[in-house]
Image (spheres, grey):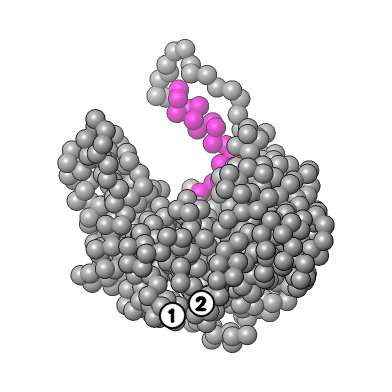
Amino acid sequence: MTQTPAAPADIIAPSRQPANQAMRTTAASSAGAYVASSMTKCVASNRSVSCSSSVPLTPSYRSRSLEPSIECPTQRPGPGDGRPVASTAGCSGERRIARPSASARTNSSVAGAQCHEYAPATTSTASPISRTSGGWSWGGMASDCSNGSGQTGRSALRRIVIRWWPPRRTLDAARRRIMKLPAHGSTVDDVMARLRSMQGKDADYHSAKTWGLIYNAGPDVDEMLHAAANHVLAENALNPFAFPSLRQMQGDVVDVAANLLHGGDDVGGTMTSGGTESIFMAVKTARDRMREEKGIRHGRIIIPRTAHPAFIKAAHLLDLEWVHMPLGDDLRTHAAPLAEMITDNTVLAVGSAPNYPFGMVDPIPDMAAIASAAGVPFHVDACLGGFMLPFLERLGHPVPPWDFRVPGVSSISADVHKYGYAIKGASVILHRPKANVRHQIFMFNDWPGGLYGTLAFLGTKPAPPIAACWSVLQFLGEDGYLRLAKDTLEATRKLIQGVRAIDGIHVWGEPDMTVTAIGSHTQDIFAIGDVMNERGWHFDRQEQPNALHLMASPRHNDVIDEFLDDLRFAVAHHAEKSTKAATYGDDVSAEAAAT
Ligand SMILES: Cc1ncc(COP(=O)(O)O)c(C=O)c1O
């Protein structure tokens, strides 16, 4: 195992935690890589899924991962040796690693063979869903083990979501009556009164009680954002010839980002609607570039286990395989496995700066060097760090190398709607060399409407995020961002010190930035989270290992003492077990129920 690196400056470095201890007791093993591509068949009953495959199977590349997965792969070229490989995240009813039997490897119709790494390859493997310490264990569920159509596995996933996703119960209760278009209009005051009355249960970000979703920089920044967004409310950036100012603003935002990230003259890019679109564009660019340069038709991307699921979504939409890199017991991604994992069809390798779950920056120089030596593009996902790390570095905080100063980095995504404090809908994707931007372009003219061209995914493109983004950069300037970075770092430092002073809880890993995951070896951290929720605090929950996920904002300085008081109370007075799960993203249960 790779040595745990030295902790960064003690301003945010927590005490070193025996991460591996809890990792072994949580729902999933941390190490392991797996691939998803083509599918096999799974049949779902109420609480179980059994998978079958008609393809010969061999062990996956270091496949030890037992976590739930949306995709359930069957067959792909093996790591460099051309053998087909079957692997999935958790296809067993038991949380143990079993070597595949000879029959599992060769039998052409072994029920459950898909799951050969984890279960006896004899008969169908029922995988009960069970609840583990504080989180839902999907019992090694292969939740989308479909073939190309994806129906069988996906409906299994739907049933699971409908039945088990706790937020659905909460949301449904608060959610919808059937609304019809009112027969008559109302006044602005009436409508606004109704709108406000619907917000009673919304997360309270005005008083800085949210530790995610909102990056709260204070009322002066809010005023700037409102003014700029309102000013261009109706405009549409689809057509820059109609609104050249929007084109200019987007170009300025890209220039500012490229400069902050030490891009130099050969870096160029575009604004997008957010991290997911920026990541999609990075993956598409790599796919099309490798198709052009190396003739790769069926590409693969390699991503750390802690990378954002937007990469998997992009791979899914762009018909690419994806493979997870193993995660060290120190909760870090290590570069060395990348060298073994790159195959002839690899079109992109990825690192995060920092990753969402633990706020840690991946070893970008080593990973980029390995990728570049193999002629593989390397993307840095700095959606979280792009507008925070540059200022932390200027403040003298130790920041591992991650931007365009690192040779081999070919693209970077950086969200201005996170620590750039723009309104939602503002991100940047940058490419080196800038000529690669052409792979983002879509053009079509064989219809009566004339040439339709877009630089990224959206067609009609709202102007408010563009204008607000451009304006907040002007409004804050370098000194404003430095002030906010200092405040956010201060809040993070107090948070981490406060957590370290409370018996029974700790910070997972060694955050390089202002993102913190709080866990416990002895108590149900989600039950502690329940008490915090009751006291009005809002944050995400994550698993593998279970944690409360806190992203600090400058305004948290105002409430950090209150937060820590409540946390001390919650640690001392919580139920034994929580009934809530770790979820992230939209209420997909409603969609699942409807189909
Ligand atoms: C590291 C990282 N990458 C990508 C994303 C996706 O960004 P978005 O939600 O703007 O699509 C996030 C979101 O939190 C993130 O933290």
Q: Nearer the viewer, residue 546 or 421?
A: 546
Circle 1 sits on which residue? 370
Which residue, given by chain and number where applicable, does mark 2 sit on?
A: 338
Query: Would you say the residues marked 1 and 2 are in contact, meaning their CB atoms lie under 8 Å apart?
Result: yes
Seen at 78% across and 43% down, the residue is 46
Asked which quadrant contains residue 576, the reply is bottom right
- The percent coordinates of residue 127 (x first, y second) are 78, 55
Q: Earlier in the sequence, mark 1 or mark 2?
A: 2
Classify 10 Å Cα crowding around label 1: few (below 14), some (14-19), many (20 and above): many
Q: Residue at x 64, y 64 (%)?
A: 86
| Quarter of the figure with the N terminus | bottom right
Nearer to us in this view, 552 or 28: 28
**Range drawn in magenta:** 190-205
Q: From the image, give the main secondary structure of the stretch colored magenta.
A: helix
Rounded to the nearest angstrom, the CA distance separating label 1 from label 2 is: 7 Å
Q: Nearer the viewer, residue 108 or 558?
A: 108
Q: Would you say residue 208 sits in the magenta stretch?
A: no
Residue 229 vs residue 402: left or right? Answer: left
Q: Position of residue 172 (x, y in %)?
A: 65, 35
x and y percentages locating residue 563 in the rendered image? 60, 60
**Which amino acid lies under the numbered mark 1 shown in the image of this protein?**
Ile
Q: Does residue 376 appear in the picture of this structure?
A: yes
